[in-house]
């Protein structure tokens, strides 16, 4: 599997402060979430990958290109949507996006054509001749996305893409991200505080805390791996059923009327649950593994 | 991504060579300047003196017209170093005023709303960014300084024997060098001010201030300390020293040259270096909070 990002002992110092410390990780996902509390170093890591940070030790590569020896090549692969306001107020959206396209290497005619297309694509088609300074916050976010994808980058870095958006605009942004993901042509890195947004679109997560890696996981396998916890909804003589499960080695705890949770012992066969229920004429309405949400994973990483 | 499909697709078409992209920022900065009527109007105004020089050159080569001049005056006229020195002084001052008009809108709009990370996150360097913006000023100022200067010289050459052209070819070099260095210094000052002063009007006033405050400071230092070293703060005086030297002339009816040529070159180099340092601090993808 191709490494999207590879960090080896990466440390970054800004001013006198060490912001990132000895990061080593290989990221392969199609959509990678970058999480962490404020000041964890998420934005600094993005800026390092873009070659903005001068005081870097260790190595980092993006899609196989080293940021120290081939930063021009790296930047040629990336589309970047920064967190803060980033636009030229006096320009119309179409001129702005076209200029950004040309700066990324598109010929003038192709840049103009793509500028129109991406502005329609992100939903700013009708407003593309308006000056960016007159845009609302949500429109500015979409314009930032448009300039990031105008040149069809191999990797798209989105720093807080849903920041400050109202629910419909947020949904629209997530749909666009999903669509870019579905195209398969672009890898995405999404940096966000909003765990639900990251969970909705990401398949790999890197959690930073105080400039270090707190947790790195493949979200799908992380969820799948956690098969020790079972949630059961049932009707019938539940006390006896729970006692029988406890006798079989399960740790059972109530989870509300008609519900209980249990932690399965190592090597426990799930069929046992069904046979015990059948013996006691307990009707099982739902039996499911308890999936760890991204919030669980995040909080666990923060506690550790 | 066709509009009707509304789905994302990458770009796999032709790309431009990296070396050619530095002019893009300049092109986009020039477009609004040219779309306003003020700049073409001002540029046209700046070409009055070159036009007057063309008329003078024509008159100097018309014996019938020259006979009408008083004998003392007709002995004074002639096209040489002194003639082009005056051309440099007048066009140099106009170039400085035009810089105050054009420069403020070049960099500050990109910085005000945090646009710089978008430029620098692409395969595009800070050097290319500044070079592109500088090309705008250099192009505009060239159009009113050394280019019309060379045209006047070419007209004069066409009306003189070949030997005159050969003997005075150095004037072409002096015009390009003298006005070229002035354009570089003006451009850097203009860009540095544009990078640091957000408001256009204030930035324009700041460009004027660099020269007028410098001239005032120079006079103050000279009168208080009874020295001539203060003139080093007067950039117009500094560049005048260089023009006098390059055009091998002696200014008539102006204050005498008090700086040496090497001092003048050093002052301009320091001014340019200072402006580059100021630009380097501002033209960055993000701010470091220490």
Image (cartoon, coloured by chain):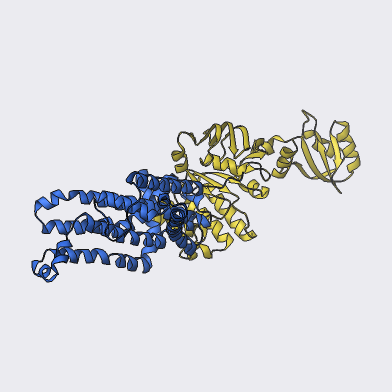
Report the front residue among A130 and B77: B77
Is residue A229 depicted above or below B126 in this figure?
above
Relative placement, left or right, of A211 versus B59 is: right
- Visual hue assigned to chain B: blue
Report the front residue among B65 and A182: B65
Relative placement, left or right, of A31 versus B180 is: right
Image coordinates of residue B7 in percent, x first then y, are 49, 54
Quadrant (top left, top right, bottom left, bottom right) of the C terminus of chain B: top right
Does residue A231 appear in this view?
yes
Residue ranking furthest to the top: A267
Chain whose colour in the figure is yellow: A
- Residue B91 location, quadrant: bottom left
- Residue A275 location, quadrant: top right
Quadrant (top left, top right, bottom left, bottom right) of the N terminus of chain B: bottom left
Image coordinates of residue A227 in percent, x first then y, are 73, 35
Is residue A3 depicted above or below B168 in this figure?
above
Is residue A160 depicted above or below A224 in this figure?
below
Image coordinates of residue A79 in percent, x first then y, are 49, 47
Report the front residue among B270 and B128: B270
Residue ranking furthest to the front: B226
């Amino acid at each position: 599997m191709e490494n999207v990002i590879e960090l080896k002992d990466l440390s970054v110092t800004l001013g006198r402060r060490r912001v990132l410390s000895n990061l080593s990780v290989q990221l392969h996902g199609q959509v990678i979430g970058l999480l962490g509390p404020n000041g964890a170093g998420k934005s600094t890591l993005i800026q390092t990958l873009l070659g903005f940070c001068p005081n870097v030790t260790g190595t980092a590569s993006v899609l196989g290109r080293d940021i120290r020896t081939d930063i021009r090549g790296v930047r040629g692969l990336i589309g970047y949507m920064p967190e803060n306001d980033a636009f030229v107020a006096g320009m119309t959206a179409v001129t702005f996006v076209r200029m950004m396209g040309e700066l990324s290497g598109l010929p003038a005619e192709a840049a103009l054509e793509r500028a129109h297309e991406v502005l329609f694509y992100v939903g700013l088609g009708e407003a593309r001749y308006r000056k960016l300074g007159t845009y609302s916050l949500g429109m500015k976010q979409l314009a930032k996305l448009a300039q990031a994808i105008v040149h069809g980058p191999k990797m798209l870095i989105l720093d807080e893409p849903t920041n400050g958006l109202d629910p419909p605009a947020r949904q629209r942004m997530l749909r666009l991200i999903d669509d870019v993901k579905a195209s398969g042509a672009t890898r995405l890195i999404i940096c966000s505080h909003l765990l639900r947004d990251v969970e909705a679109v990401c398949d790999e997560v890197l959690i930073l805390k105080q400039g270090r890696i707190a947790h790195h996981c493949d979200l799908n396998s992380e969820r799948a791996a956690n098969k020790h916890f079972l949630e059961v909804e049932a009707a019938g003589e539940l006390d006896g059923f729970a006692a029988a499960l406890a006798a079989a080695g399960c740790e059972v705890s109530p989870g509300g009327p008609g519900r209980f949770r249990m932690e399965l012992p190592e090597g426990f066969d799930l069929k046992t649950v069904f046979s015990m229920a059948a013996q006691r004429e307990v009707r099982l309405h739902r039996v499911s593994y308890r999936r760890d949400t991204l919030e669980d994973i995040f909080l666990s990483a923060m506690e550790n | 991504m066709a509009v009707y499909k509304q789905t994302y697709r990458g770009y796999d078409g032709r790309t431009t060579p990296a070396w050619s992209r530095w002019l893009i920022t300049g092109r986009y900065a020039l477009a609004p300047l040219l779309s306003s009527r003020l700049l073409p109007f001002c540029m046209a105004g700046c070409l009055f003196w070159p036009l007057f020089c063309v008329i003078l050159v024509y008159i100097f080569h018309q014996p019938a017209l020259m006979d009408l001049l008083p004998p003392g005056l007709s002995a004074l006229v002639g096209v040489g170093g002194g003639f082009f020195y005056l051309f440099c002084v007048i066009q140099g001052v106009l170039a400085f005023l035009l810089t105050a008009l054009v420069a403020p809108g070049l960099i500050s709009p990109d910085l005000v709303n945090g646009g710089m990370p978008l430029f620098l996150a692409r395969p595009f360097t800070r050097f290319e960014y500044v070079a592109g913006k500088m090309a705008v000023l250099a192009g505009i100022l060239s159009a009113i300084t050394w280019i019309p200067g060379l045209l006047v010289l070419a007209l004069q050459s066409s009306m003189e024997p070949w030997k005159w052209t050969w003997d005075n070819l150095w004037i072409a070099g002096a015009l390009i060098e003298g006005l070229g260095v002035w354009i570089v210094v003006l451009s850097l000052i203009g860009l540095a001010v544009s990078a640091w002063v957000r408001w256009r009007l204030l930035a324009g006033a700041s460009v004027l201030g660099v020269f007028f405050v410098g001239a005032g400071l120079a006079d103050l230092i000279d009168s208080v300390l009874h020295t001539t070293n203060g003139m080093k703060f007067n950039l117009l005086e500094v560049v005048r020293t260089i023009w006098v030297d390059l055009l091998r002339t002696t200014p008539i009816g102006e204050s005498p040259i008090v700086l040496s040529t090497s001092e003048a070159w050093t002052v301009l180099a320091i001014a340019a270096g200072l402006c580059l340092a100021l630009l380097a601090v501002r033209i960055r993808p993000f701010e470091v909070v220490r």
